[in-house]
Image: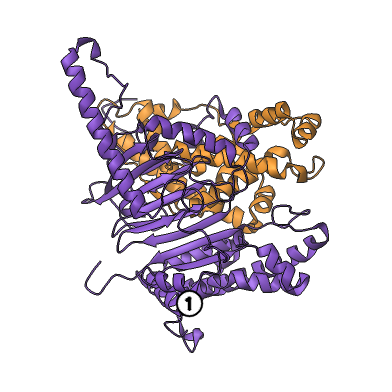
């Protein structure tokens, strides 16, 4: 064929489709993948509410303490999830995996599963994290993912002009662009973008750009990390460098102490979302409910209805005997169906999408309802519920006139009590109360107030 | 020529590949035997990665590895309930778990970086550039599909599951599977026609 005379382009047809499919190569598993799976499968579980694993102090000392701690506390985790839109500096426990201190205007959602794996999305703002060692802990940001083991770090999401197309999957037309700054105080962090994977040691900072680039800057070498040019440095230069390193580390430790004080959490202390002495987790005192009004915080527990599967035998952790399994399964199945039916009807009311209602999971339909609600509505609902729970406001006279999202949230907030009642009908109130214990398997703190008029 | 360049990509379609572990190894894995468990992971890991990486294209290696690992952890938790003599092969059963886990991941609506198609002078028209464009075309076509149908497409095209198996595994109506997969293939054909014409024009 003559290259100077381009022929008409033939339709690639099915053969072209086949070639394209052949061209789409898949990712191969890493060489140690089976080892990882077996290690994760065999890993003993950690305690429900472990003491802090990390200790503020020398980096090496903190690391050693964490290793000992991880070996001592073994028992199941409890699922937890939540959202936070901070209007002021706010401390938030992330289940039993760590704590976040969010500066004003930060937006954060999190979910900790029953294995302890934590997945967070930080859309905006400046958040400091202290993470207990254990299962994966990943923070998704607009510029990439940040994954850690046990460590202290901070993520700042800075809005930028849109310079690169970044689409929120499934939300056509929504464009987001941001640069993300990661600062590591202890341990190490892996920052992963579309095009770069960067391991950051304690004392370093990296900028993740909207184009997927990662730039390490302002690295602070730790004492003992002599750098690559020490062979050429004079003794005086080394002494100066050591003094600089020590000063920088002292600053980082001071910053760490400051944010931990702000979080109300001292070494060996209690996590801020633990139950008050003498009270159950899901039954906070009137004083605490009154405090939570300021941050529009509500607390909810429920038996993980959307991901629940029936018990096949006695459950020692929850104290469910063999003779109670059938009643327990029946009660939770009933609650699961009631929740699904409600979400489905609200989904239909919101979207009119009957095909989706027949194929989507309850969780997916719930997300759709949340996504289609006006900005700020969720925070307004949290505010009303927090006020009602503290006795500072009355519930709406006619719930049917409230929005779909409000009916969804109000029902969700009652799932814990309703599930206990459903169980009580089968096993009796004392057993239902005992099985719920200090909270069902999924526990969530939701906070974030509406933006003040004229504010954000 | 563009046609020749496309022709250079006549690599065989990835086959469903791999076999199945034998019943004895399966029983030992159910009993918690470490070597048998390792054999199970090593037998199916390539297929699980293949499925996860195609369904989750654009989400990064870390996410794909997490999904693959979660898949096998779920497999081990539920392995006692798998019936070796039942209608599903173990590979189909494992791929179903992987597909559902990947669907959950897709529903999270996490930010996905949409790769721009870059054509530098030195790369234009070469095999690598064409391959990249073909892959971009597939990914663009798949983005139009719901998570369930994206799973259905990958299971059908790369793992050899038939329509009934897919419909059963993903709890989708059989007719829907057929019609939507047909539409997905047509969309892909259209995308490829555009790529093909562009490459052809540049020659």
Q: Nearer the viewer, residue A98 or A194?
A: A98
Q: Chain of mark 1?
A: A
Q: Which chain is purple?
A: A
Q: Secondary structure at mark 1?
A: helix
Instruction: Identify whether A70 is placed above or below A114.
Output: above
Q: Quadrant of the C terminus of chain A?
A: bottom left
Q: In the shown orientation, is residue A205 left or right of residue B165?
A: left
- Give the image location of residue A106, x and y in percent: 32, 57
Residue B3 position within the rendered picture, expressed as x and y whole percent measured from the top left: 40, 30
Question: Quick one: B200 or A406, which is closer to the camera?
Answer: A406
Dot 1, how many residues are within 10 Å of its Cα: few (below 14), some (14-19), or many (20+)? some
Q: Position of residue B113 (x, y in %)?
A: 36, 45
Name the residue rendered at 45%, 79% in the picture: A403
Residue A426 in view here: yes
| Colour of the chain lettered B | orange
Q: How many marks?
A: 1
Name the quarter where the N terminus of chain A is drawn. Answer: top left
Say which quarter of the image contains residue B30.
Answer: top right
- Asked if residue A181 can be seen in this view, the reply is no
Q: Is residue B163 left or right of residue A70?
A: right
Residue under circle 1?
A: A389
């Amino acid at each position: 064929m003559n290259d100077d005379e381009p022929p008409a382009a033939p339709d690639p047809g099915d053969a072209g489709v086949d070639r394209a499919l052949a061209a789409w190569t898949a990712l191969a598993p890493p060489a140690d993948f089976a080892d990882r799976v077996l290690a994760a499968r065999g890993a003993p579980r950690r305690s429900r509410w472990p003491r802090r694993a990390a200790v503020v102090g020398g980096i090496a000392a903190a690391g050693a303490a964490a290793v000992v701690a991880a070996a001592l506390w073994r028992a199941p985790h409890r699922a937890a999830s939540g959202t936070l839109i901070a209007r002021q500096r706010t401390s938030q426990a992330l289940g039993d995996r760590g704590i976040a201190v969010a500066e004003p205007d930060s937006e954060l959602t999190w979910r900790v599963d029953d294995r302890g794996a934590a997945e967070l999305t930080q859309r905006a703002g400046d958040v400091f994290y202290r993470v207990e060692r254990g299962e994966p802990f990943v923070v998704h940001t607009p510029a990439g993912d940040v994954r850690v083991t046990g460590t202290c770090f901070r993520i700042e999401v800075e809005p930028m002009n849109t310079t690169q197309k970044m689409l929120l999957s499934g939300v056509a037309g929504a464009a987001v662009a941001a640069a993300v700054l990661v600062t590591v105080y202890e341990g190490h962090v892996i920052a992963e973008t579309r095009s770069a994977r960067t391991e950051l040691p304690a004392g370093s900072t990296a900028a993740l750009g909207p184009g997927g680039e990662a730039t390490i800057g302002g690295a602070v070498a730790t004492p003992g990390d002599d750098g690559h040019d020490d062979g050429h440095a004079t003794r005086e230069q080394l002494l100066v460098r050591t003094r600089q390193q020590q000063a920088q580390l002292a600053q980082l430790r001071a910053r760490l102490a400051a944010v931990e004080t702000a979080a109300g959490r001292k070494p060996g202390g209690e996590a801020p979302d633990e139950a008050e002495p003498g009270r159950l987790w899901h039954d906070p005192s009137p004083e605490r409910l009154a405090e939570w009004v300021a941050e529009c915080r509500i607390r909810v527990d429920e038996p993980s209805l959307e991901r629940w599967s029936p018990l096949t035998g006695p459950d020692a952790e929850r104290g469910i005997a063999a003779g109670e399994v059938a009643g327990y399964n029946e009660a939770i199945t009933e609650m699961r169906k009631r929740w699904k039916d409600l979400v489905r009807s609200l989904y239909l009311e919101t979207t009119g999408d009957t095909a989706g209602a027949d194929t989507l999971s309850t969780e997916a339909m719930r997300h759709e309802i949340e996504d289609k609600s006006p900005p700020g509505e969720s925070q307004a609902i949290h505010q009303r519920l927090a006020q009602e729970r503290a006795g500072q406001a009355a519930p709406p006279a006619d719930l049917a006139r409230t929005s779909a999202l409000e009916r969804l949230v109000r029902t969700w907030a009652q799932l814990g009590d309703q599930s206990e009642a459903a169980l009580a009908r089968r096993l009796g109130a004392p057993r239902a109360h005992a099985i719920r214990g200090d909270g069902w398997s999924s526990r969530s703190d939701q906070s974030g107030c509406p933006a003040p008029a004229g504010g954000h | 020529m563009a046609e020749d360049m496309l022709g250079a990509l006549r690599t065989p379609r990835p086959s469903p590949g791999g076999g199945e572990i034998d019943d004895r190894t399966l029983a030992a894995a159910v009993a918690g035997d470490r070597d048998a468990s390792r054999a199970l992971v090593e037998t199916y890991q390539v297929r699980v990665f293949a499925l996860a990486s195609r369904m989750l294209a654009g989400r990064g290696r870390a996410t794909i590895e997490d999904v693959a690992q979660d898949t096998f952890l779920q497999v081990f938790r539920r392995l006692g309930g798998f019936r070796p003599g039942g209608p599903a092969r173990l590979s189909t059963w494992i791929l179903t778990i992987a597909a559902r886990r990947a669907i959950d991941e897709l529903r999270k609506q996490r930010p996905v970086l949409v790769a721009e198609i870059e054509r530098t002078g030195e790369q234009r028209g070469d095999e690598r550039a064409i391959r990249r464009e073909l892959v971009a075309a597939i990914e663009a076509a798949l983005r139009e599909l719901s998570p369930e149908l994206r799973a259905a497409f990958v299971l059908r095209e790369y793992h050899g599951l038939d329509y009934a198996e897919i419909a059963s595994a993903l709890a989708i109506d059989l007719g829907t599977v057929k019609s939507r997969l047909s539409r997905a293939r047509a969309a892909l054909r259209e995308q490829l026609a555009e790529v093909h014409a562009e490459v052809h024009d540049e020659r």
